Amino acid sequence: MLPHADDAITRDGKALILAYDHGLEHGPVDFEPNPDTADPEAVWDLATHDAVSAFAVQKGIAEAYYPSYSDDVSLLAKLNGTSNMWMGEPDSAVNWSAEYAADLGADAIGFTLYGGSNYEVEMAEEFREAQETAREHDMGVVMWSYPRGQGMKNDTAADTIAYAARQGLELGADIAKVKYPGSGEAMAQACEMAAPTKVVMSGGSKTDDAAFLSTVESAISNGAAGLAVGRNVFQRENPIEILDALEAVIYDGKTAKEAIELTGDAALADD
Ligand code: FBP
């Protein structure tokens, strides 16, 4: 990783990456809890929130909307991605090149690596090409480092997540996005293994405010630089309110409880 390569997608060294590639990865089912979010414009509007340091989307959503949002949103071009309509060993199609993303004005590229998959070698070679092109264009590099595949029994075990985070450093990512490994101690180990590559926690499926913010607080207080999140924001009835709370926890060092109080959710603050 290079110093300052991720400046355009971080704020004071911290990151809140809003991910919106779910229409491809999971399909329209992810929009059902909040049907307005099937309209990309609704989520581009969320990405203009001050808390959001980068917006991760696939090519079609970037081509159609980024020209209208380029003044207000940092674009993280998620280069690979695939639907879940097929079965098999984890793999992901490269849908646009880093060169094409640079031409569109992207600030950074994002790339999934399924460590442990039978396709890990091919995916790492595809990542190499994208990473080196990103460097030529001064774009940051974010790796979705997701161990997964036939031989992977527990993809959130502490050692597995530490290894995934380390792959980010070894292969030249500025930021490695990993799943929460279940404890603050395990997150600290992952961050230590990745440094100086930053680690962000993956949001995961939607949970309640208190549980979600407590996990984010644990990740941040154990060395994570932030969060890359989709469903836990856009599936909520009030996405702005959770973005306000995340801003308090990630950038201002507030606890989950303080953030909930600040954002006015008194009922949850009493939990
Ligand atoms: P979530 O916060 O909704 O989990 O989004 C983060 C993300 O990495 C997305 O970029 C991607 O679409 C999704 O998770 C993939 O999740 P999974 O591979 O676990 O189904």
Image: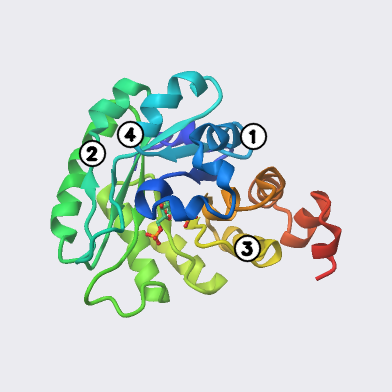
Mark 3 vs mark 1, CA separation in Å: 20 Å
Image coords of residue 29 (percent x, y): 46, 55
Instruction: Tell me the crowding category of disc 1: few under 14, some 14 to 19, or many 20 or more residues within 10 angstroms, Cα based.
Output: some
Which of the two marks, 4 or 2, is nearer to us in this view? 4
Three-letter code, disc 4: Lys
Name the quarter where the N terminus is drawn: top left
Whether pointer 3 and pointer 2 mark residues with C-beta atoms closer than 8 Å, the reply is no
Image coords of residue 142 (percent x, y): 37, 45
Image coords of residue 41 (percent x, y): 53, 31
Residue assigned mark 2? 130
Whether pointer 2 and pointer 1 mark residues with C-beta atoms closer than 8 Å, the reply is no
Three-letter code, disc 2: Ala
Question: Would you say 61 lies left or right of 235 here?
Answer: left
Whether pointer 4 and pointer 2 mark residues with C-beta atoms closer than 8 Å, the reply is no
The numbered mark, 3 or 2, whose residue comes first in the sequence reads 2
Residue 212, disc: 3
Mark 3 vs mark 2, CA separation in Å: 32 Å
Three-letter code, disc 1: Asp
Residue assigned mark 1? 50
The numbered mark, 4 or 2, whose residue comes first in the sequence reads 4
Name the quarter where the C terminus is drawn: bottom right
The quadrant of the picture showing ligand 1 is: bottom left
Which of the two marks, 3 or 2, is nearer to us in this view? 3
Residue assigned mark 4? 59
Image coords of residue 191 (percent x, y): 46, 60
Q: Do we see residue 77 in this rendering?
A: yes
The numbered mark, 4 or 1, whose residue comes first in the sequence reads 1
Question: Would you say 100 lies left or right of 203 here?
Answer: left
Residue shown at 48% from the left, 30% from the top: 74
Mark 3 vs mark 4, CA separation in Å: 29 Å
Dot 4 falls on a residue whose secondary structure is helix
Residue shown at 44% from the left, 25% from the top: 66
